[in-house]
Image: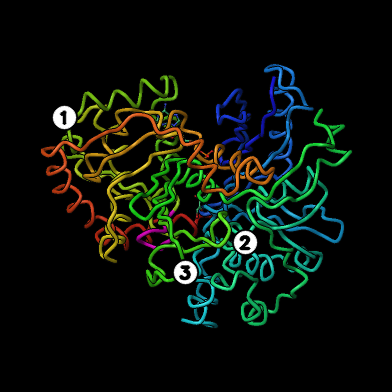
């Protein structure tokens, strides 16, 4: 077999590794699931050791089951779930479970940041301090677990931790560093203002590296553990959404990415740091050196569908359950679902909002409920599209990626609700492909990330909007938009009631 690169996509539900040859073909793929721990309402944690073990099992299977020769693996890079806090001691030992991107315990810390730094925080980090970002998590540990924080000497985000375990070298790649909201995004450095305002030492912040930058080789210890050789070169990688954008060739402002993973994301490529969305969407450094991207996030997208399946259709096949929505109608016969199962980010930065069904009728069938979930998730994406449209941005093509892009019915629902052309990839592994592209660029197989993304681009089927369905969806989306305001107070009271339970 010829040379390959490995793209390691460290998601929230599983790690998926794609072996990609020099022509951009995925020659083998392996994945490994790991659990999510939700010990209290709003909490979401994982054990970093599960990421390392899952990654290692998938690599071992690529070697033993798929016949990938270790000496043919020229390079490895990563895509990683963003914002998770992995706190490390002096010896780089993990001090507590990682606090993830969808953990919303940090509302007091987000208020503290806003009160202390106000507009200056948004001007520097280009983001509002939201619950999911890493800085509020750091402050939460500092305030709530001082004995643990006193032992902390550094921190990293999830895929940067896995890369550390594979190479022995600690660093943070820039698109994930931006997602900590402790960076001066336009100047591409850690922000001294943020460090001083919150009493965090500069040494606490690891070195920042670029997406395609060489980060080391596989360490002898990890080679013995995994079967890899110490010749394999390792490169920085990207935050999963930046990697997804690279893997789906979102390289021009007329295209957006729609990703349905555990979270949901609408992402736009930004050539420079000029755009000003006033903190309504996130704005981060890209893993393409010198570039940026903006995005809005639905906290529970694929998660909402998986929750529905686990709770109401545990014995059904996933694909069959999703396709049963075809028996319902546009608008699920008047049943509306909002997907705020773990709070929301965009457009409502509200960690305490919760999901709802409105309009349940005695005639509704299970297929209506499935369809309402699929539609509610996409209505929430449409809210993000509306922010971009209000800001005067225009685009004509949506590239759909993530586990949710496996369903043709859901892709058509996206086209009809967005009223735009939706394009799928030959393989929905956008982030894994993005990670492979960063390794290929780092190895010098291509002159730039853009060249690699264009060469390995694998657009597949197009889904065009139907004018009648799009018009019906526009009517229902206008009703959907009223649900947040109408349910927020009740939702907050219910959560307070739940939290007060002994
Ligand atoms: N056959 C399917 N049709 C539609 N959606 C699916 C299907 N299988 C899985 N999914 C959705 O894909 C999501 C996982 O996507 P993935 O991109 O793997 O997430 P992550 O990167 O967060 O681990 C699940 O939460 C699930 O809702
Ligand atoms: O918090 C965000 C982006 O800001 C999430 O998109 C995470 O990056 C997790 O991604 P998935 O596991 O859903 O791919």
Residue located farthest toward the front when viewing the structure as drawn: 447
The image shows residue 91, relative to residue 167, as above or below, that is below
Look at discs 2 and 3 and give the one toward the viewer: 3
Q: CA distance from mark 2 to mark 3?
A: 16 Å
Name the residue carrying label 1: 363
Res 496 seen here: no
Question: Which residue is at a point 17% across and 43% down the rendered structure image?
Answer: 473
Residue 278, how many percent across, how many down?
Answer: 38, 72
Residue 106 drawn in magenta = no
Residue 75, how many percent across, how many down?
Answer: 71, 38
**Contact, mark 2 vs mark 1 (Cβ under 8 Å):** no
Sequence-wise first label, 2 or 1: 2
Our reading of the magenta stretch's main secondary structure is loop
Chain part drawn in magenta? 343-350
Identify the secondary structure beneath mark 3. loop
Res 342 seen here: yes
The image shows residue 173, relative to residue 128, as above or below, that is above
Name the residue carrying label 3: 273
Name the residue carrying label 2: 177
The image shows residue 152, relative to residue 200, as above or below, that is above
Residue 347 drawn in magenta = yes
Q: In front: 440, or 66? A: 440
**Contact, mark 2 vs mark 3 (Cβ under 8 Å):** no
Looking at the rendered image, the quarter that the C terminus falls into is: bottom right
Looking at the rendered image, the quarter that the N terminus falls into is: top right
Sequence-wise first label, 3 or 1: 3
Identify the secondary structure beneath mark 2. helix
Q: In front: 402, or 263? A: 402
């Amino acid at each position: 077999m010829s040379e390959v690169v490995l793209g390691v996509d460290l998601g929230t539900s599983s790690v998926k590794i794609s072996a990609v040859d020099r022509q951009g073909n995925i020659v083998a793929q392996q994945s490994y699931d790991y659990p999510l721990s939700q010990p209290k309402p709003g909490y979401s944690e994982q054990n970093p050791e599960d990421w390392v073990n899952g990654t290692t099992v998938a690599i071992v299977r690529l070697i033993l089951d798929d016949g990938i020769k270790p000496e043919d693996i020229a390079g490895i890079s990563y895509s990683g779930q963003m914002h998770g806090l992995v706190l490390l001691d002096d010896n780089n030992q993990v001090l507590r479970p990682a606090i993830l991107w969808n953990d919303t315990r940090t509302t007091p810390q987000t208020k503290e940041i806003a009160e202390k730094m106000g507009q200056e925080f948004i001007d520097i980090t280009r983001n509002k301090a939201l619950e999911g970002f890493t800085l509020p998590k750091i402050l939460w540990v500092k305030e709530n677990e001082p004995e643990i924080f006193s032992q902390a000497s550094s921190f990293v985000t999830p895929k940067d931790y896995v890369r550390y375990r594979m190479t022995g070298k600690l660093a943070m790649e820039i698109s994930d560093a931006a997602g900590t909201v402790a960076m001066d995004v336009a100047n591409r450095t850690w922000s001294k203002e943020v460090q001083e305002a919150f009493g965090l030492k500069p040494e606490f912040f690891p070195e920042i590296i670029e997406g395609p930058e060489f980060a080391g080789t596989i360490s002898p210890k990890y080679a013995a553990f995994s079967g890899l050789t110490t010749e394999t070169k390792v490169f920085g990688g990207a935050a999963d959404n930046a990697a997804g954008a690279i893997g789906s060739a979102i390289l021009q402002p007329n295209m957006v990415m729609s990703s349905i993973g555990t979270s949901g994301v609408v992402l736009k490529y930004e050539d420079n740091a000029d755009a000003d969305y006033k903190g309504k969407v996130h704005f981060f450094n890209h893993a393409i050196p010198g570039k940026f991207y903006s995005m809005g996030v639905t906290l529970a997208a694929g998660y909402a569908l998986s929750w529905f399946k686990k709770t109401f259709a545990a014995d059904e096949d996933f694909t069959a359950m999703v396709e049963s929505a075809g028996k319902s109608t546009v608008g699920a016969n008047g049943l509306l679902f909002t997907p705020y199962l773990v709070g929301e980010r965009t457009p409502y930065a509200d960690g305490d909002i919760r999901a709802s069904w409105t309009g349940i009728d005695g005639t509704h069938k299970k297929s209506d409920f499935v369809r309402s979930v699929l539609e509610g998730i996409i209505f929430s994406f449409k809210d993000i599209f509306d922010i971009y449209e209000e800001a005067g941005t225009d685009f004509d093509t949506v590239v759909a990626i993530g586990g949710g892009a496996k369903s043709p019915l859901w892709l058509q629902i996206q086209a009809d609700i967005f009223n735009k052309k939706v394009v799928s990839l030959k393989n929905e592994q956008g982030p894994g492909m993005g990670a492979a592209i960063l390794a290929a660029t780092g190895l010098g197989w291509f002159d730039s990330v853009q060249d690699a993304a264009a060469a390995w681009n694998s657009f597949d089927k197009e889904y065009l909007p139907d004018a009648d369905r799009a018009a019906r969806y526009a009517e229902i989306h206008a009703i959907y938009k009223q649900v947040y305001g109408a349910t927020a107070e009740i939702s907050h009271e219910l959560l307070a009631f739940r939290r007060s339970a002994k």
